[in-house]
Image (cartoon, rainbow, N blue to C red):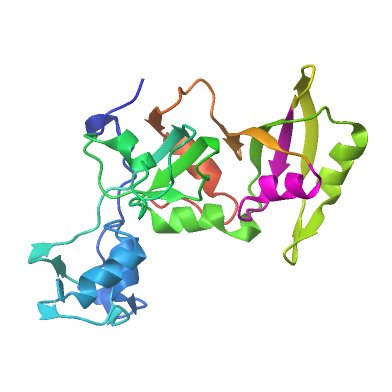
Amino acid sequence: MQQSAGDLLLTIPPRRPARKAEASTQRTHGLARVLSKRGLCSRSQAETLVRDGRVRVDGKLIRDPESRTHPAARIAIDDTAAGEVARRYLMLNKPRGLVTTANDERGRETVYALFADAGLPWIAPVGRLDKASEGLLLFSNDSEWAAAISAPESQLDKTYHVQIDRLPDPDLLARIQVGVRDGGELLAAKSATELRRGEKNAWLEIVLDEGRNRQIRRLLAALDVSVLRLVRVAIGSLRLGALGKGEWRVLDEDEVRALARPTEQVRR
């Protein structure tokens, strides 16, 4: 079942504000980045807030998103204190037909409709699934955790079940792993195996250890194979499991840590 916010949400306690004696030695960052790191909004949203004159730092109005700011500075948005918020880590089983964005210029329904009335703070998708794709999609307001998962050096496996319009042979599976050049990029899978087949089509399990835009669809199209369905079933050790379409749940602390390895550890 879909969970509500409130007490069911995993809360990784935010870092305690630095003491005055420590603040002078802390590294400063651009104001927009500090707002994002506090889990208040996205970097682009923060830039807009600052340029619109809605943010004060230690009582002073700041209009430059890159203004150097201590992480422990007193920040207010619209004269309301903007402290660090509790971290949220969620997984969603994205249905086909929804766009992975907060607002769509074409008026299409987005994944955020599935969180309506849940009482969640600002959260952002960690990576994306295109409109026609389904399955496991992560959300968080912890920008450092999200960056660690998305970083190319993390080499975090992403597993997909893909229905194709033909019956594969060993040569096709090998070519998917060898890869093809498309638009100057090498598109290849870490592994490709057959799951099951019918009379005219089959399901493959394809594992990627890198993330390129529409990678599987572009790779298979270059091999003259059409994708009928594409479902992401796992990210690293985290599996979609029995989570129903359109449902979401909170990650437990072990799951949060496991995804952040090896490049990042969840902060206490």
Residue at horizontal 47 percent and vertical 50 percent from the top: 126
51 is higher (above) or lower (below) than 18: below
Q: Magenta residues, as a range?
A: 203-224
Residue at horizontal 52 percent and vertical 36 percent from the top: 136
Q: Is residue 165 left or right of residue 18?
A: right
Q: Quadrant of residue 170?
A: top right
Can see residue 189? no
Q: Is residue 246 left or right of residue 225?
A: left
Q: Report the quarter where the N terminus lies.
A: top left
Q: Residue furthest right?
A: 171
Q: Is residue 96 left or right of residue 4?
A: right
Q: Position of residue 118 (x, y in %)?
A: 24, 34
Which of 136/179 is in front?
179
Q: Residue furthest top?
A: 199
Q: Residue furthest front?
A: 106
Can see residue 93? yes
Residue at horizontal 78 percent and vertical 20 percent from the top: 197
Q: Position of residue 261 (x, y in %)?
A: 57, 49
Q: Position of residue 268 (x, y in %)?
A: 37, 50
116 is higher (above) or lower (below) than 176: above
Which of 23/262 is in front?
262
Q: Position of residue 130 (x, y in %)?
A: 52, 45
